[in-house]
């Protein structure tokens, strides 16, 4: 994980995501989720490519159901892009890295 | 033009990886292109119980890690790249990807398939809001809730069993009377106290505001319509072959699968296909492996003659 990637929890979600000065891509995942492993390299690549412009917060839903419930996450992987504390876009399921990068770029423009 | 390969394999599922083991051992310069991570759809399964040699079952992740290690041991390369198109070249084929072109004397399409959608109103709107295509991914969100599974094959019944360990109640909906799943799986479903079965029933619509609330059902024999309140719906009604990259290039059958002869050759010379993207492979792990091996032998025969 790069320094722009942090582990999100129910306890730090407010501080790390909602109060973040940088836009945040939240990756809701779990260890038992095959597709979460499929999308993980793409999320790591996004973290590297958008370093300094985007923060990645990985939330393990097994330990942090509250954060997942609050944003209606019922399928994983779910990625939600937050800007200034507001959920701007939600992506459910595995997307190729290029399409994920397009979505992120659109919100960072 | 980037490096030229003897064999370019598109897709690192069981078929593509099995083919790569053989191509590597034939000392052919081999690359496997994978848009996400190696393993394929089997990674979505809870556990593999019917792969010969594993009487106690095996976790799909560890099994596919071994496949990958086996491929790398014998010299093939696995690249993360999303194939977009395949086109003929002077000496073989070119696979164009999001990160450059891969030229191969022979190309093996092992792109597999993706889950089939029901195609009813409400499905797209409520996907990820109670509608799911993967019980092992999303089952935990429905602990002690009521969920429904639609389908009649191995996957559907395995998902129902998996969910029966988490949910309060599982309602299995099937459009026919008889199930296609292995008898051993059917027996487990029929004896599970947590699973209720609705036969001869189809889902006509999926309703809910913001999240799934209920299903509109229709009995195909009586025509009777009904509503079923559920918290989750798991759709497991088979797959659609992923043939976008060879559209217009090779012959497909009526189901959209690539037509291959007994040697897993397509209608174009030097272009092969294996696994459940073809018309010659039941959607099973072991058959995918077998077809990958079969195709790799055909590729080797082709390369040694051309």
Image (cartoon, rainbow, N blue to C red):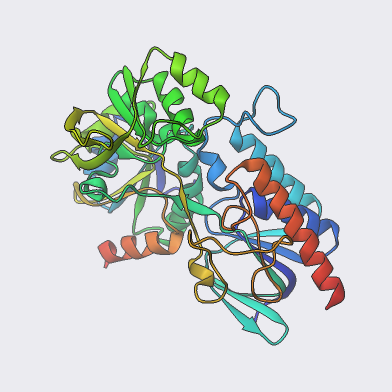
At 50% from the left and 35% from the top, the residue drawn is B180
Residue A60 seen in this snapshot: no
Task: Judge from the rendering whether residue B119 lies leftward or rightward of residue B208; answer left or right.
Answer: right
Q: A81 and B143: which one is in front?
A: B143
> Where on the picture, by quarter, is residue B299?
bottom right
Task: Judge from the rendering whether residue B237 lies leftward or rightward of residue B78; answer left or right.
Answer: left
* The N terminus of chain B, quarter of image: bottom right
Measured as percent of width and height from the top left, residue B98 is found at: 50, 70
* The C terminus of chain B, quarter of image: bottom right
Task: Please tell me whether residue B85 is drawn above or below residue B60 in the rendered image.
Answer: below
Q: B264 and B115: which one is in front?
A: B264
Task: Judge from the rendering whether residue B11 lies leftward or rightward of residue B25; answer left or right.
Answer: left
> Where on the picture, by quarter, is residue B92?
bottom right
Measured as percent of width and height from the top left, residue B27 is found at: 85, 62
Q: B162 and A95: which one is in front?
A: B162
Measured as percent of width and height from the top left, residue B5 is found at: 73, 72
Q: B45 and A25: which one is in front?
A: B45
Task: Judge from the rendering whether residue B141 lies leftward or rightward of residue A2; answer left or right.
Answer: left
Furthest residue toward bottom = B90
At 72% from the left and 32% from the top, the residue drawn is B52
Residue B236 seen in this snapshot: yes
Furthest residue toward left = B209
Task: Please tell me whether residue A84 is drawn above or below residue B301 in the rendered image.
Answer: above
């Amino acid at each position: 994980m790069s320094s722009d990637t942090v582990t999100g929890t129910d306890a730090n979600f407010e501080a790390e995501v909602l109060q973040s000065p940088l836009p945040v891509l939240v990756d809701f995942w779990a260890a038992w989720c095959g597709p979460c492993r499929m999308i993980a390299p793409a999320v790591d690549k996004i973290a590297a490519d958008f370093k300094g412009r985007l923060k990645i917060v990985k939330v393990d839903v097994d330990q942090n159901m509250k954060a997942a419930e609050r944003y209606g996450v019922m399928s994983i992987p779910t990625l939600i892009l937050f800007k200034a504390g507001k959920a701007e876009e939600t992506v459910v399921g595995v997307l190729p890295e290029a399409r994920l990068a397009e979505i992120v770029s659109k919100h960072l423009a | 033009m980037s490096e030229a390969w003897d064999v370019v394999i598109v897709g690192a599922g069981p078929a593509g990886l099995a083919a790569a083991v053989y191509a590597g051992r034939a000392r052919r310069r081999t690359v496997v292109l994978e848009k996400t991570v190696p393993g394929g759809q089997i990674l979505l399964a809870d556990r593999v119980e019917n792969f010969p040699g594993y009487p106690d079952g095996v976790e799909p992740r560890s099994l596919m890690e071994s496949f990958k290690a086996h491929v790398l041991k014998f010299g093939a390369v696995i690249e993360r790249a999303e194939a977009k198109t395949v086109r003929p070249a002077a000496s073989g084929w070119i696979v164009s990807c999001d990160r450059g072109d891969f030229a191969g004397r022979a190309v093996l399409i092992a792109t597999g398939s993706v889950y089939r959608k029901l195609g009813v109103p409400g499905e797209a709107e409520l996907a990820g809001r109670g509608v799911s295509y993967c019980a092992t991914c999303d089952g935990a969100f429905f602990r002690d809730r009521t969920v429904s599974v639609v389908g009649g094959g191995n996957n559907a019944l395995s998902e129902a069993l998996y969910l029966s360990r988490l949910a309060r109640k599982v309602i299995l909906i099937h459009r026919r009377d008889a199930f296609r799943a292995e008898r051993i799986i059917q027996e487990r479903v029929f004896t599970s106290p947590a699973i209720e079965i609705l036969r001869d029933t189809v889902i006509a619509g999926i309703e809910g505001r913001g999240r799934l609330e209920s299903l509109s059902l229709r009995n195909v024999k009586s025509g009777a319509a009904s509503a079923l309140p559920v918290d989750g719906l798991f759709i497991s009604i088979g797959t659609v072959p992923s043939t976008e990259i060879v559209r217009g290039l090779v012959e497909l059958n009526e189901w959209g699968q690539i037509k291959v002869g007994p040697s897993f050759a397509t209608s174009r010379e030097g272009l092969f296909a294996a696994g459940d993207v073809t018309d010659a492979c039941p959607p099973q792990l072991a058959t995918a492996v077998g077809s990958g091996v079969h195709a790799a032998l055909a590729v080797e025969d082709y390369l040694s003659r051309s």
